[in-house]
Image (cartoon, grey):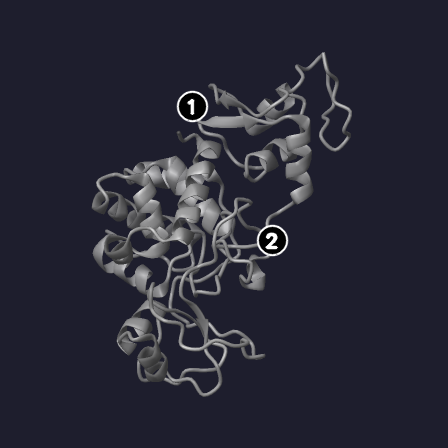
Amino acid sequence: MRRLCLALLCVPAAGVLPAPAAANVPHTVMPGETLWSIAAANGFTTRALAAANGLSPDAQVVLGSTVQIPSVPEAAAALSRGPATSGDGDSDADDSASSSAPAAAAPPPLGAYTVRPGDTLSAIAARARVPAGEIAFMNGLNLRGELLAGTVIKLPTGAPAPRSGPVPSVPRVYSPAGPHATPARLSSSQIGQVAAANGVSPSLAAAIAYQESGFNNGVVSRANARGVMQLLPGTWDWIQSTLAHRALDPNSALDNVHAGVLYLGSLLRSTRGNPALAAGAYYQGLGSVHQVGLLPETQRYVNSVMALRSRFGGP
């Protein structure tokens, strides 16, 4: 029996513990099991097993869900990576998100733009060939208000970039509209419970949440998306007025997930239950997917989300 020799991974043993598998092996959570008990039974610390599964060490595992038992090298590699550093697949995320992000590779958000000195909303809209009101709604901006240099906005998918060149050396500015990035972190089980309660696949919701923010509600992307599910202000308002049956708290991480799950459910209905197309629409926009299909960067996003589902009990 192979003994563990990495002090970083080992736990004190009252008796002989089974050696972990030589490769990633799925384990179905049984009644009474916790992340700690599963880790101890396989010779790992809770922290090592959690890192290998993209979970918080205090995450609550769900009965019947799947936990991947890593090999020693896999667990060591997961620990050495530490908390990931980008949200929404975006290496340029706000500093408040720098302590968490998905490990899987994905493209940056579509349509990100930072306002340059001298820009106006009408001028940006004219160059992007979209109505100024559409940009204002998407980003929670006042159509007639002053647009400050450094304001982070999202342009509709497919709109031409208004201008290339360096981002101005001014502080980033975000609209005060909700949802708001708040210092909270959720577990995959919390996200899965919200999804299941709303008829959405827990593994798909958790995979998208992990890809978007690493379960960190403090993430603000360079395309103005916020929170665990990386929602734009316009999307938040649409969900609140169209899909939600109660007032959602823009400061709540759980309500951010609730809104994102409702939106994902609407995309699943619109794509006849196709999880890959729904994930693609979550990233690219449903209208754009219908018009031009999945863009290459969207396909990368979808591939990443589908691969992540297995971490959270999905197919």
User: Which quadrant, please, contains the N terminus?
Assistant: top right
Q: Secondary structure at mark 2?
A: loop
Viewer-closest of 130 and 176: 130
- Residue 279, image x and y in percent? 35, 46
Callouts 1 and 2 close, C-beta under 8 Å? no
User: Which quadrant, please, contains the C terminus?
Assistant: top left
Q: Is residue 227 above or below residue 270?
A: below
Residue 302 shown left or right of residue 219 in the figure: left
**10 Å crowding of disc 1: few (<14), some (14-19), many (20+):** few
Residue 166 image label:
none
Residue 99 image label:
2
Q: Is residue 275 above or below residue 144?
A: above
Residue 198 shown left or right of residue 84 in the figure: left
Viewer-closest of 115 and 143: 115
Q: Earlier in the sequence, mark 1 or mark 2?
A: 1
Q: Amino acid under label 2?
A: Ser
- Residue 293, image x and y in percent? 29, 51
Residue 64 image label:
1
Residue drawn at the location 55% of the way across and 34% of the way down:
53
Residue 56 shown left or right of residue 275 in the figure: right
Residue drawn at the location 35% of the way across and 65% of the way down:
233
Viewer-closest of 97 and 34: 97
Q: Is residue 256 above or below residue 79?
A: below
Q: Is residue 270 visible?
A: yes
**10 Å crowding of disc 2: few (<14), some (14-19), many (20+):** some
Residue 306 placement: quadrant: top left
Q: Secondary structure at mark 1?
A: loop
